[in-house]
Image (cartoon, rainbow, N blue to C red):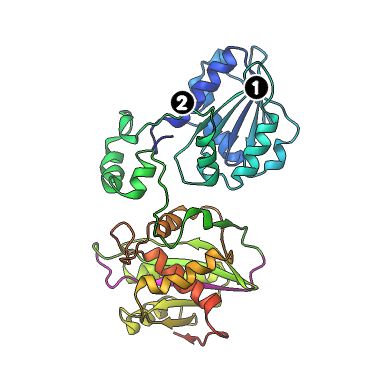
């Protein structure tokens, strides 16, 4: 387990190179998707091809690898666990297991095929996330865990350390993404990672774009929370987190209106506590005919979020893959209404979207701006 840029991919690539040179095979090279297995693990700047001398490099034919000494390998994507049925392996390199979309299913299928040779073995290289699969792997008696911090890689650019490491160090997200630490859920948090169900977002009946605009548009203002969610039956699916900032009002209004059209939404749900006239005006400048549902916060952030968290607990909300930043903020959201000491703008937008879709009675009355 390691932080971003700590050398996980190079470690895995060199491990595969050594196994192949020693005649150990077949080898499974498993990424989150086939594209990542090919572009990152095999062909990337720290991938198998880059760390292997030209005379020892394997030949790639479709998703199969053939080393000059006769060792074979196969590229696999964890997003399609059924592809693991049939092949047999002596070793497997699994990259970024912490974000595999069908992690446990893919892992289980891989174990059934990992049965050749005197000592079948596997290497996991990942930035840690507190998923069921990650905890399960660590608990296995045969697992040996090593860690490397991002700061230990002296080959990274100084600009990266100044812009990224300095910004996130000592935060919960930084401990996970930079220190390579497996962060457990806060004991009193409304959300924990085990509550996040995955979905492809199909079958939408009604879609909204929720916006939690910052009070100002200066460089010191909060991020603008923008979340897209849809209802299907008595459930909802979160489709996108487009939050960004600090941003000028014109910028967040353009992003919200663009999302409205991209996702074919019914309306934009916008919190107007920080100036309803301003919110309506900036959206009108970008999309005059876009319906806007104005909402005002009459309770604290925690109290507003509790009914939405209950929806997750009852299995009525799912997420499309790739909402890591939103999920991190949700799991760090505390009773003080903050997430790691900052305003939870993503969470605020999420709460407004799901409240509108599942907790309001009847269809909303909206107005065109």
Do residues under tags 2 and 1 come within 8 Å of each other at their CB atoms?
A: no
Marker disc for residue 90: 1
Helix, strand or loop at disc 2? helix
- Give the mark, 2 or 1, whose residue is nearer the N terminus: 2
- What percent of the width, then of the height, locates residue 216? 27, 71
The question of residue 10 being in magenta is answered with no
How many numbered circles are shown?
2
Helix, strand or loop at disc 1? loop
The question of residue 209 being in magenta is answered with yes
Please tell me which residue is depicted at 53% across the width and 25% down the height of the picture: 48
Quadrant in which residue 151 is drawn: top left
| Mark 2 surroundings within 10 Å by alpha-carbon count, few (fewer than 14), some (14 through 19), many (20 or more) | some
- What percent of the width, then of the height, locates residue 167? 27, 48
Numbered range of the magenta stretch: 203-218
Q: Can you identify the residue that label 2 sits on?
A: 11
Marker disc for residue 170: none
Q: Quadrant of the N terminus?
A: top left
**In the rendered image, the vertical position of residue 65 relative to residue 34, given as above or below:** above
Please tell me which residue is depicted at 59% across the width and 44% down the height of the picture: 103
**In the rendered image, the vertical position of residue 5 relative to residue 212, given as above or below:** above
**In the rendered image, the vertical position of residue 143 relative to residue 316, given as above or below:** above
- What percent of the width, then of the height, locates residue 205? 64, 73
Please tell me which residue is depicted at 28% across the width and 39% down the height of the picture: 161
| Mark 1 surroundings within 10 Å by alpha-carbon count, few (fewer than 14), some (14 through 19), many (20 or more) | many
- What percent of the width, then of the height, locates residue 150? 34, 35
Please tell me which residue is depicted at 31% across the width and 62% down the height of the picture: 246
- Residue 367 visible to the viewer: yes
Q: Quadrant of the C terminus?
A: bottom left
Point out the frontmost of discs 2 and 1.
1
Name the one closer to the observer, 89 or 288. 89
- Residue 43 visible to the viewer: no
């Amino acid at each position: 387990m390691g932080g971003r840029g700590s050398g996980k991919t190079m470690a895995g690539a060199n491990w595969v190179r050594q196994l192949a040179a020693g005649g150990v095979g077949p080898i499974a090279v498993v990424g989150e998707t086939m594209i990542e297995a090919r572009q990152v693990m095999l062909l990337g700047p720290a991938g198998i091809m880059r760390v292997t001398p030209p005379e020892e490099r394997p030949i790639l034919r479709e998703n199969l690898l053939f080393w000059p000494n006769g060792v074979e390998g196969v590229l696999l994507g964890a997003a399609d666990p059924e592809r693991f049925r049939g092949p047999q392996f002596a070793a497997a390199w699994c990259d970024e297991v912490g974000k595999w979309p069908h992690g446990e299913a893919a892992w289980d299928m891989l174990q059934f095929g990992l049965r050749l040779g005197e000592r079948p073995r596997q290497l996991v290289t990942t930035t840690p996330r507190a998923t069921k699969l990650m905890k399960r792997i660590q608990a296995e008696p045969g697992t040996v865990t090593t860690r490397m911090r991002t700061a230990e890689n002296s080959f990274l650019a100084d600009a990266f350390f100044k812009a990224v490491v300095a910004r996130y160090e000592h935060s919960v997200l930084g401990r996970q993404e930079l220190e390579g630490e497996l962060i457990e859920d806060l004991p009193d948090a409304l959300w924990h990672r085990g509550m996040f169900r995955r979905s492809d977002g199909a079958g939408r009946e009604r879609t909204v774009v929720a916006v939690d605009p910052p009070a100002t548009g200066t460089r010191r203002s909060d991020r603008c929370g923008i979340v897209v969610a849809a209802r299907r039956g008595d459930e909802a699916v979160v489709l996108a987190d487009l939050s960004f900032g600090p941003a000028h009002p014109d910028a967040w209004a353009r992003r919200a209106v663009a999302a409205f059209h991209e996702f074919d939404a019914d309306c934009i749900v916008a919190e107007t506590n920080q100036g309803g006239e301003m919110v309506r005006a900036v959206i009108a400048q970008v999309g005059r005919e876009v319906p806007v549902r104005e909402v005002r916060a009459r309770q604290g952030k925690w109290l507003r979020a509790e009914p939405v968290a209950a929806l997750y607990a009852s299995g009525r909300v799912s997420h499309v893959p790739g909402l890591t930043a939103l999920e991190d903020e949700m799991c760090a959201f505390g009773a003080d209404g903050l997430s790691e000491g900052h305003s939870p703008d993503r969470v605020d937008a999420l709460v407004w979207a799901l409240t509108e879709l599942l907790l309001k009675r009847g269809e909303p009355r909206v107005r065109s701006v």
